[in-house]
């Protein structure tokens, strides 16, 4: 039907959300909670606008939201909310 797949939208929200957290925290992060609400379809060649915001930090956890809208009329396509945790590459497991 020429629409974006929901998996592509989810991947985009995850990548943008991760990027905004890394840009503010400076650490590599992993998703610990991720929810998406879908409102309307987007066509493959349709221009969209993406807005990402960091909502806050608590310890090693950070929260963000990503909003995707149609550029032409501002219609909401999807909203993603995500909690992410800092990931230390030097940490060694005790298992």
Image (cartoon, rainbow, N blue to C red):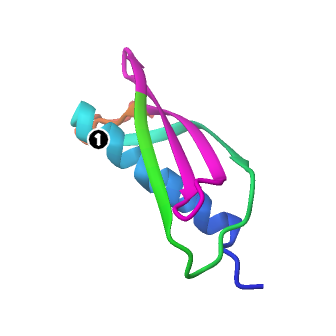
Outermost residue toward the front in this view: 73
The residue under the point 28% across, 36% down is 88
The image quadrant where one finds the C terminus is top left
> Residue 29: x percent and y percent?
37, 40
What's drawn in magenta, residue-wise?
Answer: 55-84
Residue 30 lies left or right of residue 81; in this view the side is left
Residue 54 lies left or right of residue 35; in this view the side is left
**Chief SS of the magenta region:** strand
The residue under the point 55% across, 53% down is 68
> Residue 87: x percent and y percent?
34, 36
* 44 in the magenta segment: no
* Frontmost residue, 59 versus 23: 23
> Residue 55: x percent and y percent?
44, 25
Residue 95 drawn above or below residue 72: above
Outermost residue toward the right in this view: 1
Residue designated by label 1:
22
């Amino acid at each position: 039907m020429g629409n974006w797949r929901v998996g592509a939208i989810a991947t985009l929200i995850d990548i943008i959300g991760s990027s905004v957290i890394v840009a503010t925290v400076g650490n590599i992060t992993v998703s610990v909670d991720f929810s998406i609400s879908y409102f309307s379809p987007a066509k493959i060649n349709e221009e969209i606008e993406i807005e990402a915001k960091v909502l806050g930090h608590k310890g090693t956890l950070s929260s963000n939201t990503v909003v995707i809208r149609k550029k032409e009329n501002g219609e909401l396509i999807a909203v993603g909310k995500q909690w992410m945790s800092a990931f230390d590459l030097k940490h060694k497991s005790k298992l």
